[in-house]
Image (cartoon, helix red, strand yellow):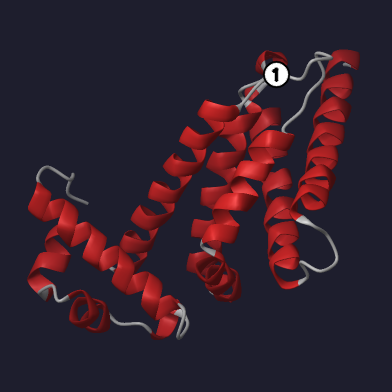
Amino acid sequence: MEQKTDLRIIKTYKALTEALKDLLLKKPLTEITVNEICERAVVRRATFYKHFGDKYELLTFILNEMRNDISQKGEQSHLPADNGNLDFYSDIINMLEYMKADEPLFRALSDNCSSSAVLSLMIDFITHTMKEFLKQDDSISDFHSASFDLLCQLLTGAFLQGISWWLNNKERFTKPEMAEQLNSFIVNALVNEKDRLLSC
């Protein structure tokens, strides 16, 4: 994928991004063609393939942009817990707010997770986001790399399922309540894993 270098390329990326987002609200990614994306974006196929290998690479770009936005919001608002304990509540709230702001798209992506390619992209998106805000706590650097990576994968699966459930059942939990539930789950998993490693 070619790097963004000037205003024309930025406009092309924006047009393609919005086109794919709009199409995802109407049908599964597996049924969307590059031709449809280009027609909606008013971009030539040759231009599309100059920047992206296929529609999955475009979706990867979109998810990476989202992850960067969430990460930047987290950096701006993250504060350590006053009691010195692990606390990711503010990070999770930021993520839920970001997803709520673009809820139709995240619903569509959740529905598209029946596709192994989309599921893989969503897991990668959540895993990287998860690692970003877990690494904000200095104590987590004590984890062995392999153990930390495995834990992130396990938490990612649960987190993705939890978010998907919440988007379809928001009347069951408010946003703060859902953030508290997810925060408690993540903190308990990290504390248990740290205790296990220290006892080895």
Depth check: give the residue in front, 77 or 198: 77
**Total label count?**
1
User: Image quadrant of residue 31?
Assistant: bottom left
Kindly tell me whether residue 53 is visible in this rendering: no
Q: Residues within 10 Å of mark 1 (few under 14, many from 20)?
A: few
Percent from the top left, x then y, of residue 26?
Answer: 45, 85
- Residue at 44% across / 42% down in the picture? 69
Percent from the top left, x then y, of residue 58?
Answer: 31, 62
Percent from the top left, x then y, of residue 44?
Answer: 9, 74
Give, as a three-letter code, the residue at label 1. Pro
- Seen in the image, is 152 located left or right of residue 109? right
Which element type, helix, strand or loop, lies under badge 1?
Answer: loop
- Residue at 53% across / 69% down in the picture? 109
Kindly tell me whether residue 170 is visible in this rendering: yes
User: Image quadrant of residue 86?
Assistant: top right
- Against 101, residue 37 (above or below) is below
Depth check: give the residue in front, 153 or 200: 153
Quarter of the image for the C terminus: give it.
top right
Q: Which residue is mark 1?
A: 80
- Residue at 82% across / 43% down in the picture? 180
- Against 56, residue 74 (above or below) is above
- Seen in the image, is 43 located left or right of residue 151? left
Percent from the top left, x then y, of residue 148?
Answer: 68, 29
- Seen in the image, is 165 located left or right of residue 45? right
- Against 154, residue 165 (above or below) is below
- Residue at 73% across / 44% down in the picture? 155
Depth check: give the residue in front, 173 or 40: 173
